[in-house]
Amino acid sequence: MGLNTQLVWIYISIGVVANVITGLLLMPLLKAIWTKINKPAPLTLAGKVQLAQQIEVQEQALARINHMAANPRDLYFHLFEMATVMFLCITGAECLFIWRLRQDVPIKLVLPAGLVLLVLGLGLSVGVMFDLNRLSVKNIERTRAALQQNIDDAKSKLNLP
């Protein structure tokens, strides 16, 4: 090894040692700064109102999930309604595009409505899959527990019973 290589290794080792020492010395200061940065700010009146609204929405969702768990027939009706609307949207988009081809209508007139229906139908299909997963027998208790936990956390922030 030449002199230059030895100097490089010496500089690297000095740099590593200096970084370790600096890190160890600054660790308490960095922890204090980190906790101060991540400390939640006190709630303003607008924040309290928004949190109260979120609690109300989550309580309504929890009541709906409890109803769906107690009455699986209503759950099936809900999913059937969503699937029917999804099917109608996708079929409507297909019919618009087929009608456009048969009647020789300019694409500028049909494209926006067809795309809206198609995207709405595809979005509803994703929503149906999400609801099927969330409200399945296996996951409904976990969904209910997560909603209750969110409600309890929000109430604790507002100091509500």
Image (tube, rainbow, N blue to C red):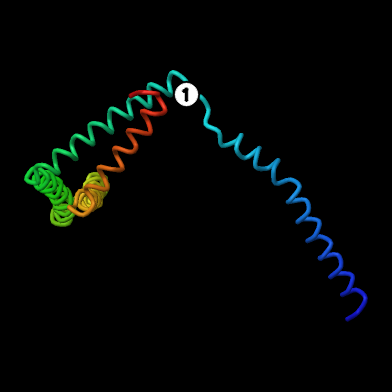
How packed mark 1 is, by other alpha carbons closer than 10 Å (few <14, some 14-19, many 20 or more), is: few
Please name the residue that numbered disc 1 is placed on. 43
Tell me which corner region of the image, top left, top right, bottom left or bottom right, holds residue 61.
top left
Q: Residue at x 62, y 40 (%)?
A: 34
Q: Residue furthest bottom?
A: 1
List x then y, in percent, for residue 82: 15, 46
- The quadrant in which the C terminus is found is top left
Residue 83 in view of the camera: yes
List x then y, in percent, for residue 28: 69, 43
Front-most of 117 and 135? 135
In this rendering, position of residue 51 left or right of residue 42? left
Q: Residue furthest left?
A: 73
Kind of residue indicated by mark 1: Leu
Residue 114 in view of the camera: no
Task: Indicate whether 87 appears above or below 40.
Answer: below
Secondary-structure class at tag 1:
loop
Q: Residue at x 78, y 61 (%)?
A: 16
- The quadrant in which the N terminus is found is bottom right
- Please count the marks in the image: 1
Task: Indicate whether 23 appears above or below 1.
Answer: above
List x then y, in percent, for residue 113: 23, 44
Q: Residue furthest front?
A: 161
In this rendering, position of residue 95 left or right of residue 12? left
Q: Residue at x 23, y 36 (%)?
A: 62
Tell me which corner region of the image, top left, top right, bottom left or bottom right, holds residue 146.
top left
Task: Indicate whether 30 appears above or below 39.
Answer: below
Front-most of 103 and 61? 61
